[in-house]
């Protein structure tokens, strides 16, 4: 198949999923064309079977807000025509599904058909889509998509409820490449951990885009309580609006020497397996990809019991779940595990097993391929997209 993919190319879970999907599809023999405003950060540009098409956005002085969605629609139609794309897959509904809809119409006027699939990731529904100004157009574009998938059951149900969507939404969960996200050999791991911690100290990790929804300061609060009981270090991977609040808090608590702000990192698969535990105290996660990547590396997560997280983490088996903001309970659970190596090892094994048995790319990519085939069959046979709800 010749597949176009549009996503946010910078740091963020939906862009990661889209990019990893493109890489896996290309490895499976498909031709993949990324259509985005910059090269997705996990692409090297040298992958076989993958092309990247930049969307130029002109900044004419009249435009206080450059119309990116129009530029994207226009470039998508061009790429689809030049490269004879079979299907377009857009990640994150806003504005990508609207641009895809426009591109499909532009092509239809020239006698070409370009079906498109929209994958819902989370904040496109839970935050942005519920802003009144975005809701009607987002709902319209979701309804008009030739296929819609969501990355968890939770997000599917929330979309149906809040957007009053009447069409089918297929749940295809997020995935991880279990050959790339792997535990390290114990000796290599011990050696690499020395960069951050002494041999008798523990390592906790947090990975996010440091937006308020991630509650990064709860990570620091939790860690501050852990370190009272267990000598440990905290690796904070990523960057974003709440980084300075987290830095301030680490200083205020006097633990700044133990909190390592590593900024945005391309190779998180090299950092995650160094940790004993991940902290993910988010206000909301429709899935929690960072936890899955950690689990594949044999690192269990202390997380909040929100959104789609319980679809991934079973409390007490492959991680722990707590109410949002309960930093005391999260710290107590983390310390208990860190002080009980047998329990932590069992949980680490269960975490890796969950990733391998339920969320490995080898299991999930075929679901996307089958879904594309169904969309092509359906649209090729002349079935019209579902009409919008009132
Ligand atoms: O919250 C983020 O990290 C960014 C956001 C995105 O769309 O880029 O993440 C959402 O999509 C991820 C990938 O599917 C999910 O793992 C995250 O749970 C989801 N974030 C939220 O729902 C807050």
Image (cartoon, helix red, strand yellow):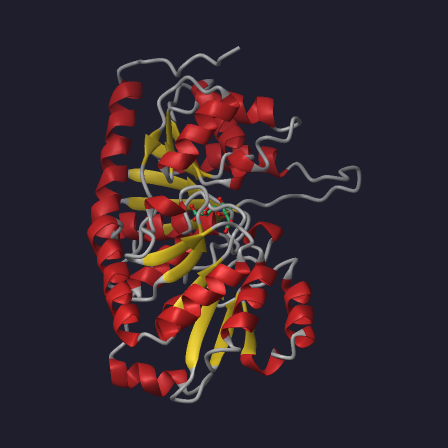
Residue 171 % position (x, y): 33, 34
The answer to which image quadrant residue 117 occupies is top left
- In this rendering, the answer to whether 386 lies above or below 145 is above
Is residue 78 shown left or right of residue 169?
right
The residue that appears at 24% across and 30% down in the rendered structure is 373
Residue at the image point whose x is 53% and y is 78% from the top: 228
How many callouts does the rendering have? 0
Residue closer to the observer: 24 or 62: 24
Name the one closer to the observer, 75 or 239. 239
Q: Is residue 272 in view?
A: no
Q: Residue at x 36, y 76 (%)?
A: 339
Residue 242 figure quarter: bottom right
- Residue 124, horizontal then vertical, whole percent: 53, 37
Q: Is 135 left or right of 297, judged from the image as shown?
A: right
Q: Position of residue 272 (x, y in %)?
A: 39, 69
Residue 257 higher or lower than 129, as above or below = below
* Residue 53 image point, x, y percent: 47, 47
Q: Which is more toward the observer, 221 or 256? A: 221
Quarter placement of the N terminus: top left
Residue 358 visible in this rendered orientation of the protein: yes
Image point (43%, 35%), residue name: 155
């Amino acid at each position: 198949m010749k597949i176009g993919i549009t996503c946010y190319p910078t740091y963020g879970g939906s862009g990661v999923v889209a990019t990893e999907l493109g890489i896996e599809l290309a490895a499976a023999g498909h031709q993949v064309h990324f259509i985005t405003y910059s090269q997705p950060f996990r692409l090297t540009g040298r992958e076989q079977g993958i092309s990247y098409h930049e969307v130029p956005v002109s900044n004419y002085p009249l435009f206080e807000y450059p119309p990116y969605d129009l530029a994207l629609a226009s470039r998508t139609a061009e790429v689809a025509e030049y490269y004879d794309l079979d299907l377009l897959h857009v990640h994150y509904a806003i504005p990508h599904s609207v641009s895809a809809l426009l591109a499909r119409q532009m092509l239809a006027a020239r006698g070409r058909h370009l079906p498109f699939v929209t994958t819902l990731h989370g904040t496109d529904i839970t935050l942005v889509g519920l802003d009144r100004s975005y809701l009607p157009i987002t709902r319209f574009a979701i309804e008009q998509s030739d296929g819609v998938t969501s990355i968890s059951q939770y997000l599917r149900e929330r979309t149906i409820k809040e957007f009053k969507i009447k069409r089918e939404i297929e749940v295809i969960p997020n995935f991880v490449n279990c050959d790339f996200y792997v535990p390290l050999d114990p000796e290599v791991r011990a050696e690499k951990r020395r960069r951050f911690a002494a041999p008798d100290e523990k390592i906790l990790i947090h990975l996010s885009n440091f937006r308020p929804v991630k509650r990064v300061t709860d990570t620091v609060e939790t860690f501050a309580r852990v370190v009272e009981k267990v000598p440990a270090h905290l690796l904070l991977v990523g960057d974003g609006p709440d980084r300075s609040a987290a830095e301030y808090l680490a200083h205020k608590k006097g633990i700044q020497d133990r909190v390592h702000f590593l900024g945005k990192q391309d190779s998180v698969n090299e950092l995650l397996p160094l940790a004993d535990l991940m902290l993910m105290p988010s206000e909301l996660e429709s899935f929690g990809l960072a936890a899955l990547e950690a689990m594949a590396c044999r690192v269990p997560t202390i997380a909040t019991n929100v959104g789609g997280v319980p679809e991934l983490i079973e409390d007490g088996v492959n991680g722990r779940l707590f109410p949002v903001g309960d930093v005391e309970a999260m710290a107590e659970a983390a310390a208990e595990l860190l002080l009980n190596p047998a329990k932590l090892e069992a949980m680490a094994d269960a975490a890796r097993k969950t990733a391998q048995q339920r969320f490995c790319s080898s299991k999930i990519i075929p679901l996307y391929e089958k879904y594309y085939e169904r969309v092509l069959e359906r649209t090729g046979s002349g079935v019209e997209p579902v009409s919008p709800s009132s």
